Image (tube, helix red, strand yellow):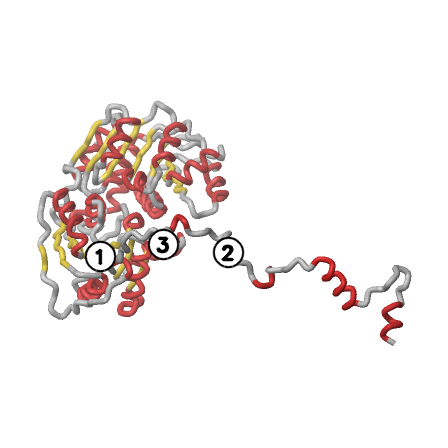
Amino acid sequence: MTFQDLNLNTPLFNALDDLGFTTPTPIQAQAFNVVSSGRDVVGIAQTGTGKTFAYMLPILKNLKYSKQENPRVLVLVPTRELVVQVVEEIEKLSKYINNRVLGVYGGTNINTQKKAIAEGLDILVATPGRLYDLALSRVLQLKSIQKLVIDEVDVMLDLGFRHQLINIFDLLPEKRQNIMFSATMTQDVDILINDFFKSPERVSIAVSGTPLDNISQNKYSVPNFYTKVNLLVHLLNDIETYNKVLIFVAYKRMADRLFEKLDEYFKEELCVIHSNKTQNYRLRSIEQFREGYNRILIATDVMARGLDIDNVSHVINFDTPDYPENYMHRIGRTGRAERKGEALVFSTEKEQEAIEGIETLMDMKIPLLELPDMVEVSTELIEEERPQIKERYNPTKRRDEDAPGPAFHEKKDKNNKENLGGKYRREISKKYKKPKTRGDKNYNKKRKR
């Protein structure tokens, strides 16, 4: 099948031709007619198979020119980076189409975004928090929304956006098309679909949790953090093989800790993104990695979710994610657009249960590689790895919840004053030579003489 078989219009053909695309991916081919029909759609396909184009091609084909100011298409994504990426993808497809696209997200001046909205738009890409703020301000009117697209909805639910999503649904017109695409399907997502989607058509290219065939996977059994660092440095020294590497860690503190260790070896080749970094820093790090200025990018799960970066040679899971679905999204950053990719996962003894959960989801065993002889096995442990000493029950020991709060503290010496009563007043009077009568202003001067 080619894009000619999808009966696209000439502007879309020309845009795809400029991008060098001739053949649709399976999810793009199967979803096109379903999305075009106007029915609610739930699409399941592995990460890296072109889900953004799968929903945008039919939407753009049927989006007629209009001068109205309120948006007609709403795309919800979980992170700011994804807003930027999706807007770029829509603009590529809209090269020969006269439409207006805007991305809005938190962490930037809301008044600038209000001004842009007031100028009118057709397609709005947004994070749930900022969208809800704009809707409450009455600058953004959602009454004209015809199509709602929810991308990476499971991440939104993990981030605690459930109530905001429900509030947004209440603001939208009841008569609309709901479209959702994801690589994995969780129980929370199923509940959301049952509550708000109307008899959705399911387009499934693979069972939820099926990895791409072009991604080879291997695992290392590693005892602790510092040995993981030693193994990572050993692998990354092979610049030719590991030419564009995305390293995943579980949380922000670990990302900073790993960045500090690797910075000793790789300096300008290294960058990091997580939610505590400024928006400009995050976008700059992604762009430098994408363009090849940096060879290594350290990221947390949420930050790199859904990012489309070409030619990532390796995804390295520095730790093993607790949720198997997160592993699927991580490794999906490589092997994109039918290219070959490699994924590695480092696991300690405590993480073996998580590895088993991943293998169960994928219905396959990940091959185990031996630790190279030249990699030093460290005995040093970080705080999280040290054994916690638990004291047997001690009734005399004050528990944490009984500890006094910040308002209960000993007074400083200068505040421990004694009530000296009348004697104190006499001493002060003697010290400062107070006049015996009110009228005798020169009393003290006389005494000094």
The residue carrying pointer 2 sits among few (fewer than 14), some (14 to 19) or many (20 or more) residues within 10 Å by Cα, namely few
Three-letter code for the amino acid on which mark 1 is drawn: Phe
For mark 1, what is the residue? Answer: 318
| Residue 43 percent location from the top left of the image | 22, 34
Q: Nearer the viewer, residue 68 or 374?
A: 374
The label nearer to you, 1 versus 2, is: 2
Residue 106, x across and y down, in percent: 42, 45
- Which residue is depicted at the point 41% across and 49% down? 402
Q: What is the distance, in whole Å, between disc 3 and disc 1 at their CAs?
A: 39 Å
Residue 398 visible, this angle? yes
Indicate the quadrant where residue 168 lies: top left
Local packing at callout 3 (Cα closer than 10 Å; few below 14, some 14-19, many 20+) is few
Front residue of this view, candidates 45 and 430:
430
Q: For numbered disc 2, what is the local secondary structure? A: loop
- The image quadrant of residue 426 is bottom right
Q: Distance from label 3 to label 2 (Cα)? A: 19 Å
- The secondary structure type at the circle numbered 3 is loop
Q: In which quadrant of the rendered image does the N terminus lie?
A: top left
Q: Is residue 38 above or below residue 16?
A: above
**Residue 291 % position (x, y):** 29, 57
Q: Do the residues bearing badges 3 and 1 touch, measured as CB atoms within 8 Å? A: no
Q: Amino acid at mark 3?
A: Lys
Circle 1: element type = loop
- Choose top left, top right, bottom left or bottom right for residue 343: bottom left
Q: In the image, which is nearer the foreground, mark 3 or mark 2? A: 3
Identify residue type, mark 2. Answer: His
User: Where does label 3 land, which residue?
Assistant: 397
- Of residues 317 and 1, the one nearer the viewer is 317
Residue found at the very far bottom of the displayed protein: 449
Q: What is the C-alpha distance between the residues marked 1 and 2?
A: 44 Å
On-image quarter of the C terminus: bottom right
Circle 2 residue: 409
